[in-house]
Amino acid sequence: MKKRLIPVPQPRSRFYRVICKTCGAENVVFSHSTYPARCKVCGTVLVKPTGGRAIVLKDKAEIVAELG
């Protein structure tokens, strides 16, 4: 007898590769971050935390790739 495959739930959170529009540096941020993520080079706030999924500030950052 074959056993049925039990589906494993996939996580809803992701890591994003983000480019800072101020200096052009690439940063990796978490989609559900609980603190304001800043650029490593210039210190600009790229991600604004909320109760769940964080908001990537479109005027200061641009999502290049979704990792994972």
Image (spheres, rainbow, N blue to C red):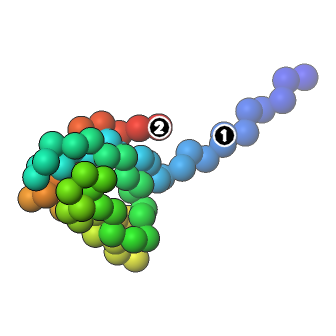
Residue at disc 1, secondary structure: loop
Which x, y percent locates residue 53?
37, 65
In the rendered image, which quarter contains the N terminus?
Answer: top right
Residue at disc 2, secondary structure: loop
Which x, y percent locates residue 34?
43, 70
Looking at the rendered structure, the kind of residue marked 2 is Gly
Between tags 2 and 1, which lies in front? 2
**Residue 46 seen in render:** no
Which residue has dot 2 on it? 68
Which x, y percent locates residue 41?
25, 51
Looking at the rendered structure, the kind of residue marked 1 is Pro
Q: Is residue 13 left or right of residue 10?
A: left
Question: Which callout, 2 or 1, points at the residue further toward the start of the chain?
Answer: 1
Which residue has dot 1 on it? 7
In percent of the image, x 24 and y 38: which residue is there?
Answer: 64
Query: Quick check: 10 above or below 33?
Result: above
Q: Is residue 45 left or right of residue 4?
A: left
Image quadrant where residue 35 sits: bottom left
Which x, y percent locates residue 18?
26, 46
Q: Which one is nearer the viewer's eye here, 63 or 12?
A: 63
In percent of the image, x 41 and y 47: which residue is there?
Answer: 15
Q: Which one is nearer the viewer's eye here, 43 or 55?
A: 43
In percent of the image, x 85 and y 23: which residue is there?
Answer: 2
Which residue, as the protein is rendered here, is positioned at the far bottom?
Answer: 51
Whole-Å distance between the Cαs marked 2 and 1? 18 Å
Q: Is residue 57 left or right of residue 9?
A: left
**Residue 13 seen in render:** yes
Q: Which one is nearer the viewer's eye here, 9 or 51?
A: 51
